[in-house]
Image (cartoon, rainbow, N blue to C red):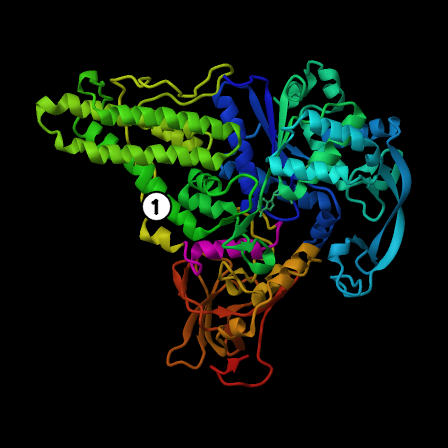
Amino acid sequence: MQDLKPLLVTTPIFYVNDRPHIGHAYAATIADVCRRYAQLRGRPACMVTGTDEHGQKVAERAKSEGLLPQEFVDRMAPRFRDMAATLGVGFDHFIRTTDARHRETVARLWQRLVNQGDIYLGSYEGWYSVSEETFLTEKELLEGNLCPYSKQPARRVSEPSYFFRLSAYQDRLLDFYRTHPDFILPKGRYTEMVRFVEGGLRDLSVSRTSFRWGIGVPGAPEHVIYVWLDALVNYLSAIGGLTLCDKHKANTAASEASPVTSAFWPPTGESLHVVGKDILRFHAIYWPAFLMSAGIEPPTRILAHGWLTVDGEKMSKSRGNFVPPEPLAQLLGEDALRYCLLRDIALGSDGDFSHERLLDRYQSELASGLGNLASRILVSLVQKVLGGAVPAPAPTLDTDAEKALRAAAARCARAARTAYEEYTFHRAIEAIWELVAETNRYVDKRAPWTLKAPEERAELGHICYHVLEVLRIVSVLVSPVMPRKAGELREMMGLPPLTPTPRLDFWPEDSWGGLQAGLKVNVKHGLFPRLETAVISQFRPDNAIAAAISQNAAAPAAAAPKGEKPMNANAADTLAQRTTAKPAVSTQQGASGSAAKDTEEAMSALIDFDDFAKVDLRVGRVISAEALPKSDKLLRLKVDIGETEPRQIIAGIRAFYAPEALVGQALLVVANLKPRKMMGEISQGMVLAVKDGTRLGVLNPTIDAPPGTRAS
Ligand code: MSP
């Protein structure tokens, strides 16, 4: 039995300046698996997730969408809550940095650091873009120290700023790392952080006067508390605030608001922060130093995961390969998505997410692997031949094949336990699927379907029992990764759900024989139904799922939630038909002062002329235009592009054009896109358009060129 100290698992709090994508989903899934595994072992565990809502970028984003910052963040935060639900990620508390409790905790922590003498007033020097009214990092600057947004020279300026005496914590941090060798995992990251701190620490600027959207410095309201000092404190706010952490008093007040209390923090509990490698330094260095200064124990463990790329490329809006988790979870089910996110990548390493691999894994490992194993026994034999009840084993009929299967199940449970405890979830999955494969081979070898005669019933029952017992064991082993499917599998076998219970360890090691004969089998549908061609075809880049993905990338971040009319329901359908949209069509992102990160990414996404030449751009003339019934976004256009028949093009421009105003207009058409279906209608091309804030206009040739003329 593992350590039973209560465990707090946290995800990073997500920036709300954009909508959730599978990178966020990956982080949340990892945290959820940690929580579920602990609970499965009888350990009290809870989880906190939430949103990081302050800072200049959020304020700018709100402005670009014509909203007040608070309005903007109020629209965005539910998207991250919904993401958790979409993924089956359960949390006990959702914290927002605009919550009153959090704001108060930050202000009080600040005061503690001041009382400790760890905060002093100095001046922050940096590159400032006058036109954009913002500080820029060295990395953001273009050559010649130009601002990447205005292309004007940035100025070296300084502004008053409070500093935290981080340098004073170097030795204490190094001591702490020495005495807590598992503080940072994977090990390679631990070494990296230790080296970094050994290299010397500079004091940290912890306030800004250049923007207002944040928590004011107590007593100096012209300063806003630096976004990381604000954000990291969420972990304390979530467990009840500052005083409640002090000396781990029994926490009653906090439990009224949230089931998560300071008992989950060391030393009474253990806290595990799941973070991406890009934010490790903040968690592994700044955060313990802040806490040491405030007299609070550092967290127990920081688990740093790697980054996901998409189809081999860094995910970014400028590449148009921004993948939201929802459409995938809807098509394949949340557990299939969770499985695939964790299947390939060793935690800590970067990994690639590909739609094709997702589909392959679903078909071969879920549908043909576990799904087929369950249905070939449960439906074809237990329900059809054995009267629908779990048969009893018949020890006298045991063969080497059964012995080997039992040994494999025991091996697998041990391997999966080690893997979960070492946070190597891909290994846990590997071990479980090895057992599934072995069991499928066992079934092939024993060929139970040949045992039809009444005198062979006992042997048939013995074989089926073995497979069902493996399935019971698998339902437990796999439950942290695939909680819903584990529950479905158990229900099919008449087993009770795995309800987390403190001190009750469900782990099925050395538990062979736990399945009771006589349980009523009840299969209503396959565990992982084979995908229909229509669903499979949606994974092609030119089809609906790709469009959903691109539309998500193209639409404004704070577009009104479902049911409301989306703001700027714009060029998504015209400009963003492909998952991997080329930079040539990346103007779809709207006019907001795009982040420097995006600029960098856009630069590295430059294409060769040959790539551009593949796009068949032609002048078209609109022959007819009409609104598509049941859609408030789409128009059906017939466009002459110099072929014998006009093309039908479905364009998402209804909000911007009355259909009749388009008839006769010349415009530019991408003529060699694969056709795709939209609202049941085939679209045979794409109309180019430009969007400026809330306006959208189709592109016209400036000379009177006949339809079909190629543009280059
Ligand atoms: N708000 C900060 C975190 C503050 S925690 C006190 C932040 N937010 S974020 O939204 O930008 O990122 C949230 C998490 O998502 C980070 O851990 C980050 O590493 C992770 N990911 C963002 N993109 C990712 C991928 N492409 N792949 C995997 N994870 C990535 O940072």
* Left or right, 657 with reference to 443: right
- Tell me if residue 271 comes above or below residue 571 in the rendering: above
- Tell me if residue 460 comes above or below residue 430 in the rendering: above
- What is the quadrant of residue 129 in the picture? bottom right
Viewer-proximal residue, 585 or 126?
126
Residue 237 visible? The answer is: no
Image quadrant containing the C terminus: bottom right
Is residue 337 within the magenta segment?
A: no
Residue name at image x 79 percent, y 33 percent: 170
- Tell me if residue 678 comes above or below residue 48 in the rendering: below
Residue 602 visible? The answer is: yes
Point out the stretch of residues depicted in magenta.
539-558
Residue name at image x 51 percent, y 55 percent: 312
Disc 1 secondary structure class = helix
| Image location (x, y in percent) of residue 90 | 53, 31
Q: List the residue tagged with mark 1.
A: 363
Viewer-proximal residue, 456 or 703?
456
Residue name at image x 62 percent, y 62 percent: 604
- What is the quadrant of residue 281 in the picture? top right
Viewer-proximal residue, 100 or 502?
502
